[in-house]
Amino acid sequence: MNQHPAHSYEPRRVILASHREASAHVAELFASTIEQSPQTVLGLATGSTPIECYNDLIRRHEQGSLSFASVTTFNLDEYVGLAGDHPQSFRHFMQTHLFDHVDIDPARAHVPNGVAEDLNKHANEYDLAIRKAGGIDLQLLGIGHNGHIAFNEPGASADSQTRVVNLSLTTLESNSRFFNSPEKVPRRAITMGIGTILKSAKIVLLAFGEDKAKAVAGALEGPVGPQNPASWLRTHVDTTFVLDAAAASQLSDGTGI
Ligand code: F6R
């Protein structure tokens, strides 16, 4: 398979002193996108990284300056085998960290269904639903320690679509912090593909902390290829990495130090 990208772009780098400033920057970007285009389609992530950003958006909603009433959202991923009411499911995460606190129409807040009877069919339908909604205008991403985006682990190809994947050992280990015991971490997930993500009009990847610095440097300055799935973002024309200084600390220009 040809792993060389047809085009290579330089993602923008926004490097801020703290994770608080980085979160506020991304929240401002999301809020202004919604204000300018109330029917916008957003791609959303779970995990520790977006929590402050979601809190900021909730605050704006509570202050009356931001409405999600006409917004459509598609989340990146969900664990296979966890129903939406399971406390560790990504649906539950989204309800508690954002959806339950804003005026989003529940019918327009999409998260893959980890207990769908036919997961492959559901995955295809998820991509179709994104297309029918007109595509994602603005996609938020975090990054895994191994460079994963959504649950596209190393090895994922640039044209992968929404599908069921096995989680890598690194991901199982880092996600076990959310489960009572490591055996309880689901081994599989349903995830948007790299190809699905790359179809978004605009992408913003948010990363904090020194433990993400190696994955960030690999994504921005290593080879573009499946060894670091976030490096595929360099084949996308409008991607911004928003980093705190610690996450930027292994970049060659020294901006993070
Ligand atoms: C979450 C997701 C993952 C996370 C990544 C970073 O929906 O798709 O790729 O963005 O694992 O997780 P945190 O933010 O917990 O470090």
Image (tube, grey):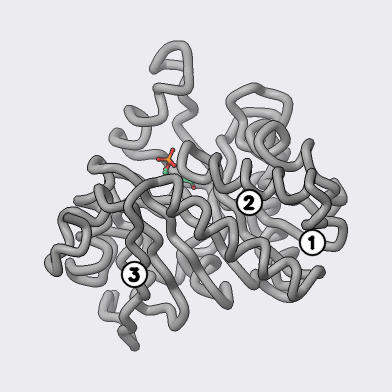
Between the C-alphas of marks 3 and 1, the distance is 27 Å
Residue 74: give x, y in percent of width and height.
68, 56
Q: Reading the chain from its start, which is encountered first: label 3 or label 2?
A: 3
Write the residue at 15% across / 56% down. 250
The quadrant of the image that shows the C terminus is bottom left
Sort mark 3 into few (<14), some (14-19) or many (20+) by Cα contacts within 10 Å. Answer: some
Disc 2 marks a residue whose amino acid type is: Asn
Q: Pick the residue in front: 92 or 181.
A: 92
Is the Cβ of the residue at disc 3 closer than 8 Å to that at disc 1? Answer: no
Disc 1 marks a residue whose amino acid type is: Val
Q: Quadrant of residue 222?
A: bottom left
Decide if residue 96 is on the left or right side of residue 52: right
Sort mark 2 into few (<14), some (14-19) or many (20+) by Cα contacts within 10 Å. Answer: many
**Residue picked out by circle 3:** 13
Quarter of the rendered image showing ligand 1: top left
Residue 71: image tag: 1
**Residue picked out by circle 2:** 75
Disc 3 marks a residue whose amino acid type is: Arg
Q: Pick the residue in front: 55 or 70.
A: 55
- Badge 2 element: strand
Sort mark 1 into few (<14), some (14-19) or many (20+) by Cα contacts within 10 Å. Answer: some
Judge depth for marks 1 and 2 and give the one in front: 1
Q: Reading the chain from its start, which is encountered first: label 3 or label 1?
A: 3
Between the C-alphas of marks 3 and 2, the distance is 24 Å
- Badge 1 element: loop
Residue 188: image tag: none
Q: Pick the residue in front: 223 or 157.
A: 223
